[in-house]
Image (tube, rainbow, N blue to C red):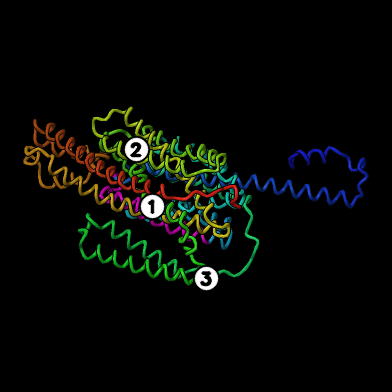
Amino acid sequence: MNTEKLITKINSMTFKSLSIPSSRKSAISSVMDVHRTKEKLRFIGIAAIFATYFISFYSSSLMNNALPRISADLDGMQYYSWAIAIPALSTAFATLIFGKLSDMFGRKKILLTALGFMMAGAIFCAISMSFPFLVVALCMVSLGAGSLMPLCFSVLGDIFPPTERGKWAGFLSITSGFTAFIGPTLAGWFVDNPGWRFIYWSHIPFILVAGVLIAAGLPSKSEQHQHKIDILGSLCVALASASLIIAFSWAGSTHPWLSFPVLGLLGVSTILWIVFFRIEARAAEPMLDPKVLSNRIFLIAAVAALLSMFGSITLNFYFPLFLQGVKQTTAILSGKLLTPFTALCSLMGLPAGLILTKTKRYKWIYITGYAMLAVGMLAGVTLSLQTPIPLILAVSAWAGVGLGLIPTINALVVQYAVPKRLLGAATGSFYFFLMMGRAIAPAIMGSLINSTYRKNLAASLPAEVKTSLSTSVLGSVNNPRILLSANSLADLQAKISLLGIKGLYVFNQLIMAMRKALEGGIRQLFIISGIFMFVSLALILLIPEICLENKE
């Protein structure tokens, strides 16, 4: 008989018939009241986690589809990768720091702090008047939103035993699946109608609801003792990460790969990483615990996840660029074409979690997810101007299933691999690796796509078009932003129409060449992503499997 039935039975009995003394009656009533209170708080706590998980996915699912048009509107297309890489660096730092701080000061305080950063960042995004300001505001959003997912998994680890975590982690996928289903299309509607700024204003009510539920449902940390925050290690990892990402962002675009600024920053980053790991080895409460890094399962999963972010970034950020820039779809249609990917990517966590709970085996799910994603990257190489919509939907859905199997298993495997006292630090450290991949990948890929686009455009422009256009017009089309902005296209057409009767022909030839050049650049990204995905798959084949029956 479960607890609820027992309480109901006790309540149905009269204390008189049991002849229980009044003092005993009070004791029994107190126990039942305490139990009811705990169950109520547990319910609110679970609701708080679901609401928090929702807002973290709501933010990313809308942002991915809206970013091409936002970049074009703020004249930041040449810095498109910055809006991915630099906020991802903030996320990497936040997951590492906030994960450790949640072990030290409790999940409740850190979750509320993260939501505070997210709200402030959303307001600044909504009022952004320049692309650099938007990137800074997105960094603030990322400081909050990026740490919410690992913190939610840490709370599940606090509440449920290992054998039940898979089921509840899977249930979280219902929340993310809903946002993934509506997010891309909703983002397209915001962009095409009231404006992209309303995307960020719409964050505010959801953040407030999540904050109230966290404040009401999650307990504060009971044990009070002095903690020593690893300030030196935190500063060192921030500088090491920043110099690494800036180096990759500059390489091939602002400066050549073998230039002094790029090589200098990479050298500084290498030295700082060495210093950081030495600091962590001696720190009383290290941010990146050496015991976590020495765990084979953690290390394999983390490195594979970092490399897999090349595939994830291509699908989440450059696939919309393909649809809106190459295929010339509207933002709304782009959102609809992305929905199979985003929805399946989120919802597949539910069957993955339930199957893991039932079978107590995770490696085969891991291998399936990575293998499907690798094949999806190869399929993406075939996408072109002529690719029919049904085939685009098929590639989108296939990749969504593969990528969707991975995140839930990632979070759970990391928790299974370490003792419970390191749960928050391990989860945060894993997402640090993941977000470093998210920061490094677009920095490299942004440089690659820009250089490939310019090279392809120069090679594909007909000689007649080159001789007909002025140097200023030819210089302006080196930025594919024009393909994403109706105003820019109209302005370009107006300039070319001055050529007279052949103006329309020249304009159409120029736009076709730009679309083909962008298509070639995105194809290069799918090739690079496919290579990294197969390396990730090879690593996952080496990961050991833990017996969950014996895991406490």
At label 1, which amino acid type do we have?
Leu
Residue 308 versus residue 503 in the image, above or below: below
First reached walking from the N terminus: tag 2 or tag 1: 1
Estimate the spatial distance between the alpha carbons at disc 3 and disc 2, rounded to whole Å. 45 Å
Residue 32 versus residue 232 in the image, above or below: above
Q: Does 91 appear in magenta?
A: yes
At label 2, which amino acid type do we have?
Gly
State the quadrant of the N terminus. top right
First reached walking from the N terminus: tag 3 or tag 2: 3
Q: In front: 211, or 105?
A: 105
**Res 67 → quadrant:** top left
| Residue 196 image offset from top left, x and y in percent | 38, 42
Estimate the spatial distance between the alpha carbons at disc 3 and disc 1, rounded to whole Å. 27 Å
The residue tagged 2 is 376
| Residue 17 image offset from top left, x and y in percent | 92, 40
Estimate the spatial distance between the alpha carbons at disc 2 and disc 1, rounded to whole Å. 18 Å
At label 3, which amino acid type do we have?
Ala
Q: Residue at 47% of width from left, 50% of height from top?
A: 544
Question: SS for tag 1?
Answer: helix
The total of numbered circles placed on residues is: 3
Q: Residue at 35% of width from left, 55% of height from top?
A: 86
Question: SS for tag 3?
Answer: loop
Question: SS for tag 2?
Answer: helix
Q: Is residue 300 left or right of residue 21?
A: left
| Residue interval drawn in magenta | 72-100
Q: Residues within 10 Å of mark 3 (few under 14, many from 20)?
A: few
Q: Is residue 507 left or right of residue 236?
A: left
Q: Is residue 159 left or right of residue 28?
A: left
Q: In front: 417, or 320?
A: 417
The residue tagged 3 is 284
Q: Residue at 50% of width from left, 44% of height from top?
A: 362
The residue tagged 1 is 306
